[in-house]
Image (tube, grey):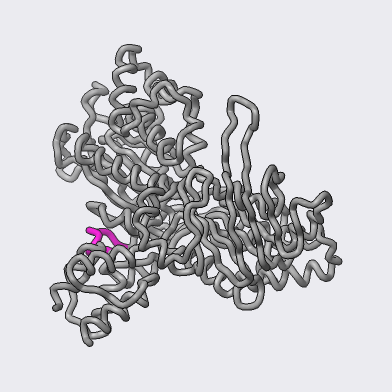
Amino acid sequence: MSMQGKDPENFTIGQNDANGETDCVTDVGTPLIKADGVTYSYRNGEQVSRGVTDVSLSINRGEFVVILGRNGSGKSTLAKLLNGFLVPDEGIVTVRGIDTADDDKIFEVRSVVGMVFQNPDNQMVASVIESDVAFGPENLGVPREEIEERITDALETVGMEKYRKGSPNKLSGGQKQRIAIAAILAMRPEVVILDESTAMLDPKGRREIMDTVLKLKREKGMAVVLITHYMDEAIAADRIHIMNDGGIIASGSPAEVFGNEDAVRRAGLELPVAAKISLDLKKAGLDIGFALTDEELAEEICALK
Amino acid sequence: MRIEVKDLKYVYSPKSPFEKVALDGISFTVNSGDTLGIVGSTGSGKSTLCRHLNALVKLQSGEITVGDIRLNSKRVDLKQLRKNVGMLFQFPEYQLFADTVKKDVEFGPLNFGFSQAEAEEAAKRALELVGLDFDEVASKSPFELSGGQMRRVAIAGVLASRPSVLVLDEPTAGLDPVGKREILELVTALKSGVTDTVIIISHNMDEIAEFCNRVIVLDDGKLIADTTPDELFNRSDIVDRTELDYPHTVKIKRLLAAKGVDLDTPALNAKELTSAILRRVKG
């Protein structure tokens, strides 16, 4: 796809747009990320293994999107395609209208879409927290004064400002992941992708990350894409995509997706405990609605009496 | 196999500026047949404690007895101890190393003095226990397998030496729901006949509630509770102080109690809770 705007500040959607017109990025309705018919396979000599097949989705400004699916279903491959870490074999991924296959624009893509991984210990590059957070913007060539400002802002957002001069190796897992998120925020992305970033944390660490995610969405209007195996985390999403065998087999609100028994079973997911109990009670003959959270379930049960 | 830990203390980097007390006056007993949960936040000392059980960490002060092996004695039969206490670390699939599944699983038994034939038999049995078909996977590279399968091969590698005690450090971390369920069902199956005593470190309170008959809580190197899951989740002082979480079933039961619906159950799993709600609503 060719870029129509010459000015790098003026990102445009390009010819793929249905009506052929160019939309300005400030347009609220324009997706930040758009994947269209994306297929990607891993090649190792003669061996070819399918990563994702014909996946289409869009991520909008301020949206909290969760991707669920079993190990090996293609979630991480999809995440890497969304920030240009991998380039599709077929189909197209655009980030703010920029084709991720366009080598010249890859830095722009990565500065819009930041990624946080599973193991907090593998993501630290410096021995002092503020240097770790400064690493991204320094590489983007941001002026020194502005870097200072960005560090302060990023650390405040994740609630770690008082650790600024400290060392990352004395932090808990949840705190390290918050620093990893701050390091991404310092690059001022519009989307943050968290690839199982809560998997290695204790309950407190997981709560810290979820609080941070919701804050980014609420206060910064950022889009967050969370890949997780924890159904509790998925309940808070605006939209969930379920992946199975490289493809998306269901999309919708948490209630829609967890209500889709077939998709849940095929993807090997487990229902949230409250949902499972509400369905079992219904099967046992009670006239009870579908509940996703513990609170909803308690209300449904009390409404029976 | 019975394990006794008395007044265990352990200090990292003693007498240096980095000195850190990791374990402080820990005493507890694990009885034959127990499934013991160990909970506490990251850095509370759970893994350090478990590493003591098969002498991966040198005892500094206190007493540990595993079966009839005293870890304080001058000469500890480390081989026998490590054969008795099988240990599965976090993300054990990263520890697979051999070029075939068979060699990987046989490695333990061969080192504990099994003959080649015995080791192969043990590997076969262990792979069957974890639900993998020996003929299908034996000659494969462990690295060709899926994440859940790799973890099961790693567990088979520990089981092949027939330990009496199995120590699992966050066995379900990073697995998808099906993988989690498989591992926990495997642990339950092992308890009937293979390994009589299981110790599980976990951050997942739903798992602790459902699978453990006893639980100990560590907080900053100290043991602050030695109890049953049912009692622990009634002790909000301990749960809140250590910033653990409650199992969903307990949360639901409490929400109902706050609305005047009291249930006659400890509610440690969804099935129990569902039946209790039905009894209450229909009865």
Could you tell whether B113 is left or right of B4 in the image?
right
Q: Is A153 above or below relative to B248? A: above
Residue nearest the viewer, comparing A214 with A36: A214
Q: Is A36 above or below relative to A171? A: below
Percent x, y of residue A211: 29, 43
Image quarter hosting the N terminus of chain A: top left
Percent x, y of residue A301: 19, 73
- Residue B231 seen in the current view: yes
The quarter of the picture where residue A129 lies is top left
Percent x, y of residue B176: 45, 60
Q: Is residue A253 magenta?
A: yes
Q: Is residue A195 magenta?
A: no
Q: What is the span of residues highlighted in magenta in the rendered image?
A: A250-257
Residue nearest the viewer, comparing B164 with B8: B8
Could you tell whether A184 is left or right of B211 in the image?
left
Image quarter hosting the C terminus of chain A: bottom left
Q: Is A30 above or below relative to A270? A: above
Count of marks placed on residues? 0
Give the residue at x 22% y 62%. Answer: A295
Give the residue at x 34% y 22%. Answer: A151
Give the residue at x 42% y 43%. Answer: A80
The quarter of the picture where residue A117 lies is top left
